[in-house]
Image: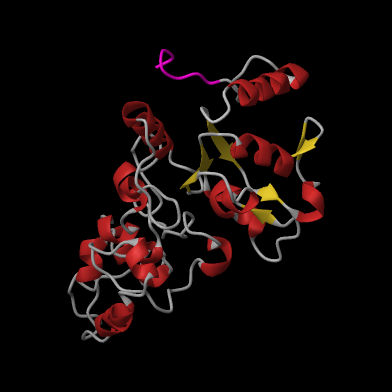
Amino acid sequence: VLDVLSLDYHETLMAAAGRQAEENLWKTVREQRGKYIAVVEGSIPMKDGGAYCCIGGRSALDIAREVCGNAFATIAAGTCAASGGIPAAGPNPTGAVGVKDAVPGATVLNLPGCPLNPDNLTATVVHYLTFGTLPDTDSRGRPLFAYGKRIHDNCERRPHFDAGQYVERWGDEAHRSGHCLYKMGCKGPETYHNCPIQRYNGKTSWPVGAGHGCIGCSEANFWDTMSPFYGRLPSVPGFGIELTADRIGAGLAVATAAAFAGHGVISGLRTGRDSEGKKEE
């Protein structure tokens, strides 16, 4: 890998520190202008001239403008770098934003997720090393291989949704049996990510697989738009495994929103049967 990849600057991995580390960064920017890929973690504070985050005597805003502005491309690693993340939640006192908003002219590929799945970063880098181009993205700058489908479309609990089998209370029989978490606030129907496929911790598990609903962490402004996290979605813009973020954004699935919400209502009207089909006493 090191024959084709050079990691010139990373705060925690490089041996250098302080001024020596910063000099290495700026040397790369000067000598490899337009040839390097910058990977940015964390949101960028804009308020008060970017005074709320400074490194080596310079604001993160100033650094991002120079480093990302001169890069071949920038990978925004994680939701904070992609769209501001939790620091950007209202009232957003520091004016935190994602890289694209801080450096509008930069070429930015967003890899949201809190945390970012390292498989998606690795796949993006390998794609560039193999083909010399960045992967295809949706309108939000997210690679389609990782964010082209909703979590709901690939969820292991989807058959239970289709069958109207929902968890009604934490710890109930349906919860222990792995039934759908939609009524418990799962935001999978509105979240685009490959969590069900790639998973975390060496592909051993992921939040829904562990019994907790998705909180939509890979979507912009999720802290404000997806909360309350344990509240059921008031409506869902369509469903079906063929839908993509761009098509929903274009309003092509509006007509199916009522059908999705109605699915939960209809299942609730079933004749008092529990998730195993037995008559309740």
Front residue of 161 and 85: 85
Q: Quick check: 274 above or below 92? A: below
Using residue 37 as the reference point, say whether residue 171 is left or right of it. left
x and y, in percent, of residue 172 in the image: 35, 66
Front residue of 185 and 24: 24
Report the predominant secondary structure element of the magenta stretch: loop
Regarding residue 264, the answer to whether it shows in the image is no
Quarter of the figure that contains the C terminus: bottom left
Find residue 67 and report its image quarter: top right
Q: Quick check: 228 above or below 256? A: above
Q: Quick check: 7 above or below 261? A: above
Quarter of the figure that contains the N terminus: top left
Using residue 156 as the reference point, say whether residue 32 is left or right of it. right
Q: Quick check: 259 above or below 10? A: below
> In the rendered view, how is the structure colored?
secondary structure
Count of numbered badges drawn on the protein: 0
64 drawn magenta: no
Regarding residue 83, the answer to whether it shows in the image is yes
Give the residue displayed 24% in from the left and 67% down from the top: 240
Give the residue displayed 43% in from the left and 41% down from the top: 117
Give the residue displayed 39% in from the left and 65% down from the top: 190
Give the extent of the magenta segment.
1-7
x and y, in percent, of residue 187 in the image: 41, 64
x and y, in percent, of residue 81 in the image: 57, 46
Front residue of 160 and 239: 239
Find residue 178 and report its image quarter: bottom left
